[in-house]
Image (cartoon, grey):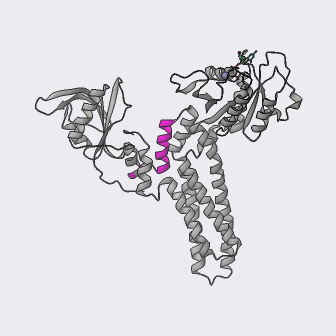
């Protein structure tokens, strides 16, 4: 890992913008403590024990020696801190003006305003966390459900990094093995032994990469939610079912400024899976074209959906529109809701040529069937819902997934080369490439540009 370097001292407001009871101005760097001490009246911060919180006042040393705020100041000395540097956290009163004044005061003592994500970047540069863990910090901040939060926490704990590091080690061992055999060709049959060994080991590592990549879709779902389209012809009960789902489950994000009830942009948490619901409705019985328009809109929504909830009216016979939607959704991940089951059933179930498991009887009026729907959803994407072992190692991030993908394809090239009888010292170049791709996941091979891009995604103060 990297040596701790002496970077300049940075400061930022680490609490969310706006008014709160308290706000925290965080300062990190080798001069952090001395710098705050210059404007602090209270115990001598340069002498207090580490990891203590100290009561006092911040004084603007200008002409009027004005008291800026009454504060609690936490002093944490390196290396056991978030950045592995000295950190001072000033707990001040949470007004926008007060907080800004405290920050300005600290900056005037010689600190530099931190860039977005720079505290976490320091933690990485100083070797406290690796790159995949830094990304976990972002995911943790963004987590929409407790399940997503748990996955991020596991990654922060280094679960993915440990697997990736082990695979890299196996690649290094394999490369070393090849070197020995190339350097001592007098050993009879060295070449064939090496080829065999390389095939076996490469296959094994590829398998593990595949397993990791399989978690990616689930990781993405936990992070971004499932784009879920509720489709069906007008009046089958789409909005009603949506409302049932919404009020039985905690809505996660509500972002519906001044819209009608048919335009909807909301997340609901279904057994740990965030569903982003796309309503296709907004069609009312105004003219006889209405069924066609409804069906067309539904088809458009299908294109961007990860999941389709197709609603049929069980109290009516199947219509041409129903059949059209059934056909249009047959290649999607789909659950068919037979709604209005509180009324006499007229739908011809025997004509529905679909697996029974995807059929769920509901009644939005009687509020029936939403539990069964939730169970089916969980099963469709997570077998029996999200289990804690699945969360142990999960690829939650597109950058990581693409690197795993590239490592895998480099190994694929190795295997093909061996099959064609290429000498091992040629194919080992691709082994090395795989090793490099994996290193980019944890940041063991990092370049500055990538680094900047990644950390800029953070908010200031993290
Ligand atoms: P949408 O056009 O598909 O969104 O359908 P709505 O949710 O607006 O419902 C259309 C009509 O059907 C409304 O009058 C609802 O009250 C009624 N409705 C919806 N679900 C049910 C149900 O399960 N049973 C009964 N009996 N009526 C329902
Ligand atoms: Zn509706």
The reply to whether the magenta stretch includes residue 106 is no
Residue drawn at x 65%, y 63% as measured from the top left: 412
Decide if residue 344 is in sight here.
yes
Seen in the picture, residue 205 relative to 103 is either above or below; the reply is below
Residue drawn at x 52%, y 54% as measured from the top left: 441
The quarter of the displayed image where residue 209 is located = bottom right
Toward the bottom, the furthest residue is 186
Magenta segment main secondary structure: helix
Q: Which residues are magenta?
A: 125-142
Residue 82: percent from the left, percent from the top? 38, 42
Residue 123: percent from the left, percent from the top? 39, 47
Seen in the picture, residue 104 relative to 85 is either above or below; the reply is above
Residue drawn at x 66%, y 71% as measured from the top left: 417
Residue 227: percent from the left, percent from the top? 62, 36
> In what quadrant of the picture does the C terminus appear?
top left
Decide if residue 383 is in sight here.
no
> In what quadrant of the picture does the N terminus appear?
bottom left
Toward the left, the furthest residue is 63
The quarter of the displayed image where residue 32 is located = top left
């Amino acid at each position: 890992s990297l040596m701790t370097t002496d970077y300049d001292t940075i400061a930022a407001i680490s609490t969310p913008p706006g008014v709160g009871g308290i706000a925290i101005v965080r300062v990190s760097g080798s001069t952090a403590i001395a710098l705050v001490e210059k404007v602090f009246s209270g115990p001598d911060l340069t002498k207090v024990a580490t990891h203590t919180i100290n009561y006092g006042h911040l004084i603007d040393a200008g002409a009027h020696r004005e008291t800026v705020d009454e504060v609690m100041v936490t002093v944490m000395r390196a290396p056991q801190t978030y950045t592995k540097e000295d950190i001072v956290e000033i707990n001040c009163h949470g007004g926008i003006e007060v907080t800004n004044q405290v920050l300005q005061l600290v900056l005037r003592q010689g600190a530099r305003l931190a860039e977005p994500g720079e505290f976490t970047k320091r933690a990485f540069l100083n070797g406290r966390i690796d790159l995949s863990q830094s990304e976990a910090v972002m995911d943790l901040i963004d987590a929409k459900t407790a399940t997503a939060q748990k996955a991020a926490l596991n990654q922060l704990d280094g679960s993915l990094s440990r697997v990736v590091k082990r695979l890299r080690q196996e690649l290094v061992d394999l490369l070393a093995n090849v070197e020995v055999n190339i350097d001592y060709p007098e050993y009879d049959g060295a070449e064939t032994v090496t080829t065999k060994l390389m095939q076996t080991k490469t296959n094994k590592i590829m398998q593990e990469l595949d397993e990791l990549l399989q978690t990616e879709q689930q990781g993405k779902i936990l992070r971004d939610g499932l784009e879920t389209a509720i489709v069906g012809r007008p009046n089958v009960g789409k909005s009603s079912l949506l409302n049932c789902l919404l009020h039985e489950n905690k809505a996660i994000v509500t972002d519906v400024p001044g819209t009608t009830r048919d335009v909807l942009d909301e997340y609901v948490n279904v057994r740990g899976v965030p569903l982003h619901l796309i309503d296709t409705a907004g069609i009312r019985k105004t003219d006889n074209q209405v069924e066609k328009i409804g069906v067309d809109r539904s088809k458009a929504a299908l294109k961007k959906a990860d999941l389709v909830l197709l609603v049929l009216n069980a109290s009516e016979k199947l219509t041409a529109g129903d059949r059209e939607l059934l056909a249009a959704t047959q290649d999607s991940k789909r659950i068919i809701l037979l709604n209005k089951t509180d009324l006499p059933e007229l739908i011809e179930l025997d004509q529905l040529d679909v697996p029974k498991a995807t059929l769920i009887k509901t009644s939005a009026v009687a509020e029936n069937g939403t539990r069964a729907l939730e169970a089916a959803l969980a099963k469709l994407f997570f077998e029996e819902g999200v289990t804690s072992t699945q969360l142990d190692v999960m690829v939650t991030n597109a950058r990581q997934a693409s690197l795993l993908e590239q490592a895998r394809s480099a190994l694929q090239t190795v295997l093909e080369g061996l099959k064609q009888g290429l000498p091992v010292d040629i194919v080992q170049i691709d082994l090395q490439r795989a090793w490099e791709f994996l290193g980019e996941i944890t940041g063991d091979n990092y370049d500055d540009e990538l680094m900047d891009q990644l950390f800029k995604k953070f908010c200031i103060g993290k």
